[in-house]
């Protein structure tokens, strides 16, 4: 077993952290009583409140209208074919939770996030005890910048998975090896940490990602979690703990799809340079270069080079096609805090 999964933190065992995080996060969220039919809480069948112009999926934290990006024709064709298959499965079995989840996922891959939210909300009305629906709806609340709604959904998902066995989550877009690298429990804790991080709630984010590390099964998921943990610890002044974490990161880890996260962690260790990591920006930016762009910016940020950090974050935001990427979201959140 990897030390990243089994090691003890200063607060006690990983298991202790998991339950401590659960207790503190649930308390911090101050969950309300179960919503009445037609209300807007978890389990509701109401549509998310959002007054939007046609084609607008969200309003950025900086006030910009966010619309579905342009896809290369060959990519769009594949996504639409996948959606058609999911729609057919749903039409054949509209109350089946798996059919609902896949229809929502395939819809979201085309950046139709509001439609996906509506699909998941209908599914939750049918299956209020299925943590997967809250996990996926929470993810798409993050995409559309509704972080409080996301936190509420992930908190409900945590309640639902308590005492259950974890399960591998199938990939909607399989990686090069066709090996899923994440699980249901991982994704709930991971995205909960992200939602708190984007809100600037770094103490809650730290707890969530510590719990996430305890359920990270693959080097990809461990590196992804370590990336956000490192950012969070350093923002909280926990540099010694961040250094302990970095000591466990190796270049030869078995990485399938988290290369950008690993490279940024190696940058913090002095084993990469910023020039090694920075890729195309503007209209040529990719998901990887967006991830690396924010990662390098945060490396500058935690080392006191704020002006360079903000410059790189602004550069990340120059490609609106990547507005759902976590590196874009995090850059946007940082700049919104500065402007606010």
Image: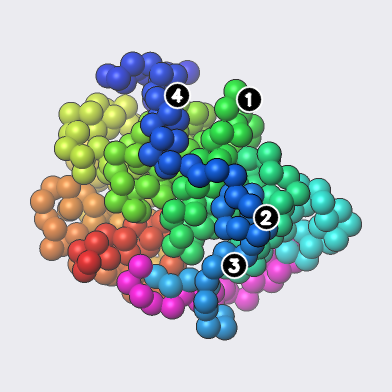
Q: Label 4, label 1: how many angstroms apart (C-alpha)?
A: 15 Å
- The correct choice, above or below, for 124 with respect to 278 in the image is above
Q: Which mark is residue 37?
A: 2
Residue under circle 1?
165
Q: Is residue 293 visible?
A: no
Name the spot of residue 312 as percent of width and height, x first.
24, 64
The mark closer to the camera, 4 or 2, is 2
Q: Label 3, label 1: how many angstroms apart (C-alpha)?
A: 31 Å
Indicate yes or no whether the magenta region holds residue 64. Answer: yes
Looking at the image, residue 232 sits to the left or right of residue 89; the answer is left
Q: Can you tell which quarter of the image residue 38 is in? A: bottom right
Q: Label 1, label 2: how many angstroms apart (C-alpha)?
A: 31 Å
Residue under circle 3?
114
Q: Which mark is residue 131?
A: none
Looking at the image, residue 242 sits to the left or right of residue 40; the answer is left
> Seen from this angle, which residue lies furthest right?
92
Counting residues from the start of the chain, the first of labels 4 and 1 encountered is 4
Q: Which secondary structure lies at badge 4?
A: helix
Residue in the foreground of this view, choosing between 138 and 301:
138
Name the spot of residue 52 as percent of width and height, x first.
52, 78
Q: Are marks 4 and 2 in contact (CB under 8 Å)?
A: no
Name the spot of residue 5 as percent of width and height, x first.
43, 23
Residue under circle 4?
19
Q: Are marks 3 and 1 in contact (CB under 8 Å)?
A: no
Q: Label 2, label 3: how many angstroms apart (C-alpha)?
A: 20 Å
Residue in the foreground of this view, choosing between 176 and 200:
200
């Amino acid at each position: 077993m990897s030390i990243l999964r089994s090691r003890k933190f200063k607060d006690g065992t990983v298991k202790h952290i998991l339950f401590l995080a659960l207790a503190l996060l649930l308390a911090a969220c101050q969950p309300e009583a179960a919503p009445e039919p037609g209300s807007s809480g978890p389990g509701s069948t109401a549509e998310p409140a959002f007054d939007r112009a046609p084609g607008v999926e969200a309003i950025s934290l900086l006030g910009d209208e966010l619309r579905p990006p342009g896809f290369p024709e060959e990519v769009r064709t594949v996504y639409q074919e996948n959606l058609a298959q999911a729609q057919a499965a749903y039409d054949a079995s509209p109350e089946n939770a798996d059919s609902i989840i896949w229809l929502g996922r395939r819809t979201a891959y085309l950046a139709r996030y509001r439609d996906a939210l509506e699909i998941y909300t209908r599914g939750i009305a049918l299956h209020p005890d299925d943590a997967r629906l809250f996990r996926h709806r929470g993810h798409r609340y993050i995409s559309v910048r509704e972080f409080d709604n996301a936190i509420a959904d992930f908190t409900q998902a945590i309640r639902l998975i308590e005492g259950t066995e974890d399960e591998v989550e199938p990939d909607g877009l399989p990686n090069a090896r066709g090996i899923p690298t994440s699980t249901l429990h991982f994704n709930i804790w991971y995205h909960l940490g992200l939602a708190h991080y984007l809100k600037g709630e770094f103490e809650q984010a730290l707890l969530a990602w510590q719990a996430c590390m305890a359920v990270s099964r693959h080097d990809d998921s461990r590196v992804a979690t370590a990336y956000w943990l490192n950012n969070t610890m350093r923002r909280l002044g926990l540099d010694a703990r961040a250094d302990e974490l970095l000591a466990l990161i190796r270049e030869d880890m078995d990485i399938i799809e988290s290369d950008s996260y690993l490279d940024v962690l190696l940058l913090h260790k002095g084993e990469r340079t910023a020039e090694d990591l920075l890729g195309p920006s503007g209209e040529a930016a990719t998901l990887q270069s967006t991830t690396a762009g924010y990662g390098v910016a945060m490396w500058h940020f935690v080392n006191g080079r704020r002006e360079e950090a903000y410059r790189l974050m602004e550069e990340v935001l120059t490609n609106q096609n990547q507005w759902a990427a976590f590196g874009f979201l995090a850059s946007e959140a940082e700049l919104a805090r500065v402007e606010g």
